[in-house]
Amino acid sequence: MSVFAHTLFSLLVVLCSFRLNDVAEACSCALSHPQDAYCNSDIVIRAKVVGKKLLKDGPFGTMRYTVKQMKMYKGFNKMQHVQHIYTDASESLCGVKFEVNKYQYLITGRVFDGKVYTGLCNFNEKWERLTLSQRKGLNHRYQLGCNCRIKPCHYLPCFVTSKNECLWTDMLSYIGYPGHQSRHYACIQQKEGYCSWYRGWAPPDKTIINTTDP
């Protein structure tokens, strides 16, 4: 190998090393309330992962998970039944890892070319970890609030600036994320377009929601 070729090869190795370091730090997700995750997803299902296969496409590949769908909460207009979930094989590219034949999961994702894709920035959680309020939200409450805007509050002071906003303050709590509002509340639209937090066991009556709760 000539001196020039050796120098060029060394330079490429250094550049590739920098590129891999960039990729390793590439996945960064903004915090999202489960209701926003629901409203912004094409597909929301409860499913058990029963198999996986690494597909050799791209530099890191794509992981294809085979799922047994238990229930679909959103996405009937996209597909009637989900059999496979696709995600990047690398966690540095926001690929999500599911355990096979162990748990039921809540899985949210987007549909591209007839395939369901998900990642670390989507809301994917073991079903047993969801609160009763979150499960009720998936059934009907979150859908009632998809015209509302959940506004994150990271530092005080913070205020709502329009009638369709709910102020999300979990990040200010010592509990951190996921906090009380994420686990137990939905932001529901009521009469005249006003939105407010709702928590309760019965289906919400949009005419009597307590606008001061929580």
Image: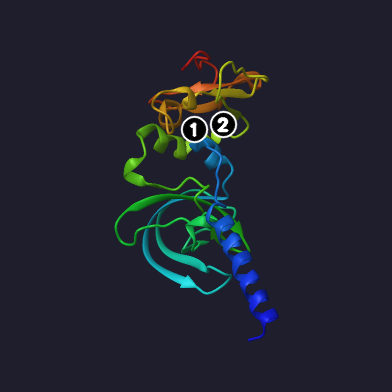
Residue placed under numbered mark 1 in the picture: 141
Q: Which amino acid does label 1 sit on?
A: Arg
Q: Residue at x 60, y 63 (%)?
A: 114
Marks 2 and 1 close (CB-CB < 8 Å): yes
**Residue 104 can be seen in this image:** yes
Q: Position of residue 75 (x, y in %)?
A: 55, 51
What separation in Å lies between label 2 and label 1 (alpha carbons)? 7 Å
Nearer-the-camera pick, 170 or 78: 170
Q: Is mark 2 on a helix, strand or loop?
A: loop
104, above or below 84, in the image: above
Q: Is residue 35 above or below residue 181?
A: below
Q: Examine the image and state in which quarter residue 195 appears.
A: top right
Residue occupying image coordinates x 31% and y 54%: 103
Disc 2 crowd, CA 10 A, few/some/many (<14, 14-19, 20+): many
Inspect the image, locate mark 2, and give the three-letter code of the amino acid beneath it: Gly
Q: Which colour scheme is used?
A: rainbow
Q: Residue at x 48, y 45 (%)?
A: 123
Residue at the spot of label 2: 145
* Residue 205 in view of the camera: no
Q: Position of residue 162 (x, y in %)?
A: 68, 20
The residue under the point 48% across, 27% down is: 171
Which quarter of the picture shows residue 66? bottom left
